Structure formats: structure tokens, C-alpha cells
Amino acid sequence: MAEQTTLKYTAEHEWILVDGDTATIGITAYAADKLGDVVFVDLPSVGDTVAIGKVVGEIESTKSVGELFAPVNGTVTEVNDAVVASPELVNSDPLGDGWMIKVAFTELPELLSFDEYTALVGE
Amino acid sequence: MPDVRYSPLHQVHLDAGASFTDFAGYQMPVRYSSDLAEHHAVRTAAGLFDLSHMAEIVVEGPEAAAALDFALAGKLSAIAVGQAKYSLLLSPDGGVIDDLVVYRTHPDRFGVVANASNRFQAAGAIAARAAEFDATVVDESDDVALIAVQGPASLAILEGLADLVTEKSARDLGYYWSTLGTYRGTEIMIGRTGYTGEDGYELYVTNSVATDLWNELAAVGAAHGLVPAGLASRDTLRLEAGMPLYGHELGIDTFPAQAGLGRVVNLKKEGDFVGRAAVEAGPPDGARVLVGLVAEGKRAGRADYPVYDADDREIGIVTSGALSPTLGYPIAMAYVDPEKSEQGTELFIDVRGTRIPASVAALPFYTRAKETN
């Protein structure tokens, strides 16, 4: 599980772990909690091009639908098949086994720090 | 913005770590930990719900029964003391102002339970319609807490309460019957009613003992697998049970017959009642009717998603939908054109741009196994 203080965040409740030119992306515990029990995850395919702010996936709970927005420009290099098969990982381990996609990024915008994200969600 | 309202049990929910949602102006628990776990607990053991946001309207007086016969779609004068009845408050045009449960607690006293979102419309309409009768209408919602225990273990849990005294035992109550009693010396009304498709009870008490009652139910119930359950699980439970939710399956523009509730309107009862002429005239030809839809996979149709036929014509709209926690496949209720309402008709739900095949299915989706004793 990633150390949450070292991650970057978006206002749309994604977290981003930057390692070299690869960004691992998931949704925050706050977002997972707001959604409720996640029952379906739809992710892009390896090789897909993603663009900042565009919807690249859907995360459905029994009650509602959340969207996964790309926080970077780049190409999907890996998709977490485990979270597609077991969507409950989003709730049980949002920052770990519940990760969604890895992207080889060509542009990494200014992102929120842990403190900034925490202030944003008021927790 | 009106002030945010709180249940008398709000502190209990805070202490339990509940997540909250706004429901008709109330901050109510949406879940305590996991809405799926809460859903399954109700199906297999028991769930404890705070429904104190719901409205309780007392109609009392020598002509209380006659007033309700005029105000509502059912024949409330025909139910016995202790009996409960599901009914509709219709507009003069035959639309549904609210759906409600009426308990006859005394010969001349009825408790009408209305949706929180319709509290003032319902109380106002009933009061106006009762004006010519010798009956009073009092909205007691702010003084009454409603706690529901739902699930197969409900009876065992109620029987474990130390300080509950009732005229009729919970065990001997039939479905849609109720009894009066006391809890820790304070008046209580218990109905064998609910909104989950399981056996269960709804307990009406004054706010002052609500916390004690909740805590004792939680303590007694723990050994039976009872968990506190939020409104998220309540919604998936009632959807599986095919029960309509006002604002989704019912509205001011819905005729009862469209929602499959024609039987709730008693056209045989003598005398006029509000909405009678419109219901007798019936909904317009071609008016959409409520159906169940089932699909494969994991993607659920949700409220307001359009429904198409095999010829790509938009023929309906989803009113409620979810991936059924009990059944494991997507279920939905939808209004569709009558010629597309036959069971087995193959339709498509537009799930955010993707057409998901769905077939018309009988309601309810889930029926609990009946006990054989």
C-alpha cells in the first residue's frame, strides 16, 4: 500500500503515484467511502491514449456511478485486472490492491499534495 | 434553504460511525460500514433501521374512518382495530400525492405514515379533506421516532427485549397487523410491516425513549446477527422486493394502474373519494406501465436511463435500478409502452451510451421463502 502522504491527488479524488515516467492511478479512500460498496469497475485497455481530465473509467457502487478521470496525458501500460474481477478491492484497499491503471505519461500537470487534498475534502 | 433536520437518534449514528445523506431535509444514515453487508444481514439475519424522518399523521374522531375513506383510495373503515393497510393519497386528477401505510390503532383513531418528502403535502391534503368530518388531523412527526427491525431474526430479537409489554405478542401478529404496548413505561406501537421483503417489525415510540430502544435492540440483536443498516441497503432491499419508491415509481403524474397499484384503489366502496372519477376514467390510452427488467453482467440501469426496443425506438425509462446484491445480476424497474410490457420482451437499457440487453420480468424480483410452520 502506498504511503498516502507521498502520493499526489486531484480534486476529482484520484491519487497518483509517480515512479519515473509511470503514473499509477487509483481513487482515494474518501471517494471509495462516498461511493459505498463498489460492484463494477470499467477500465481502459492497455495501449489506450488518455488525456488530462477525460473520463477513462467507471466505478459503480450499488447506489451510484463514479468516473475515473485521467490526471495525466499518456498511454495506458497496465490495467489492474484484479480490481475488475474483485471490485470490492476499491473499498478494502483503495491505495493498494485497489489501484486502477498505470500510464506512461508525456505530461504531468500540477497536482495536489496530501495536505492540499485533505484540506479539500475537509477530513 | 430550510434548516437541516436530525433524527432523535442522530448521536447514536454518529457514535456508530455512520455516513449520512440528505433525505427530504434530514441527515439520515446512508450506511454504517458496507451497504452490501447491511443488505445481506437483512436477508439472512436482521437489520436495524432508523426511519424517524418518516411522517406520522394521526386522524382521530367519531368520523375518522369516514374521513379517510373520502381522503384515501382504500376503504379504511373496513379494516379492523390492529390492522394496517397500504393506501394511496390521490389528487383529484388521479395522480399519486403520496403512498402511505394506515394503522387502525383504535376504533376512532388511525395513524397514517407518509413519506418524509411528502409530509406537508400529505398532512395538508388529509386535513383539508377531513374538514367536513368530525375528525381531527394532527401531524405528530416531530415527536415520533420510527425504528424498523427487518429480517428473519426480527421476532427473536423483539422477544429478547426486557422492557417491552404489548397487548398482543409480536409472535401472534399477522403480516400488516399491529399492537399497542409500552416500552420502559412509554407508549409504543408495533406493526408487522416493512419495506424490505423480509419478515420484520416497525416500532413507533416517542423521541424520549428512542435511544434506549435502539441501543437495547442493537445489544439483544448482536447475538442474532443484527447490524444497523442505512438507507442505501433499504433501497436495494425494497427494489428487489419490487416495492415502489415515491419520486421514482410513483408521482403526481402517475395513475395507480400504471404502477400496478390498481388493486389499492377501492372503486367498490360507497361514496365519493378524491380521485375517484379520474381513476374510473383511467389513464390515457398508451400510458406507460411499470415493469421489472433483468439483465446479465454487472452493469445496472439506473433512474432516468432510457429504454429502447429491438427496433431502436425509445419506449421507456428506468425509475430505479441496481446490481441486485441478493441475485447477483442487474435489476431495474421501468415505465415502458404497454405493448412492450409483456414478460420476456427483449429490450435495451442505455447505460451511459452502451445498450445493455434487458428482458421484462415479473415483479417482485425476490420473494422470501415462506416458513412452513
Image: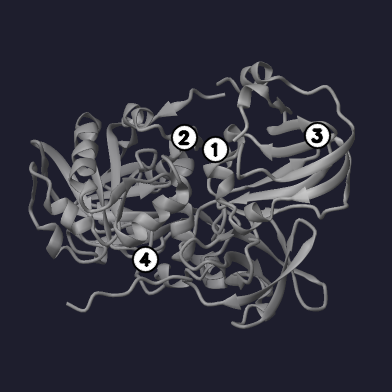
Picture coordinates of residue A18 (x, y %)?
A: 77, 30
Measure the C-alpha gap from mark 1 to mark 2. Answer: 8 Å
Q: Residue at x 59, y 59 (%)?
A: B321
Q: Are marks 1 and 4 in contact (CB under 8 Å)?
A: no
Upstream in the sequence, badge 4 or badge 2?
2
Residue B208, which numbered label?
A: none
Dividing the picture into quadrants, the one containing residue B119 is top left
Residue type at mark 4: give it.
Gly
Q: Residue at x 22, y 53 (%)?
A: B224
Chain of the residue where label 2 is placed in the rendered structure: B
Query: Mark 3 — residue?
Result: A71
Picture coordinates of residue B227 (x, y %)?
A: 32, 47
Q: Are marks 3 and 4 in contact (CB under 8 Å)?
A: no
Q: Nearer the viewer, mark 1 or mark 4?
A: 1
Q: Are marks 1 and 2 in contact (CB under 8 Å)?
A: yes
Measure the C-alpha gap from mark 1 to mark 4. Answer: 53 Å
How dense is the environment of label 1, judged by Cα within 10 Å: few (below 14), some, or many (20 and up)?
Answer: some
Locate residue A18 relative to residue B370 in the image: left or right: right
Q: Which quarter of the figure is the N terminus of chain B placed in?
A: top right
Residue type at mark 1: give it.
Asp
Q: Nearer the viewer, mark 3 or mark 2?
A: 3
Query: Mark 4 — residue?
Result: B271
Query: Mark 1 — residue?
Result: A33
Query: Mark 2 — residue?
Result: B19
Chain of the residue where label 4 is placed in the rendered structure: B
Q: Do the residues marked 1 and 2 share a common chain?
A: no
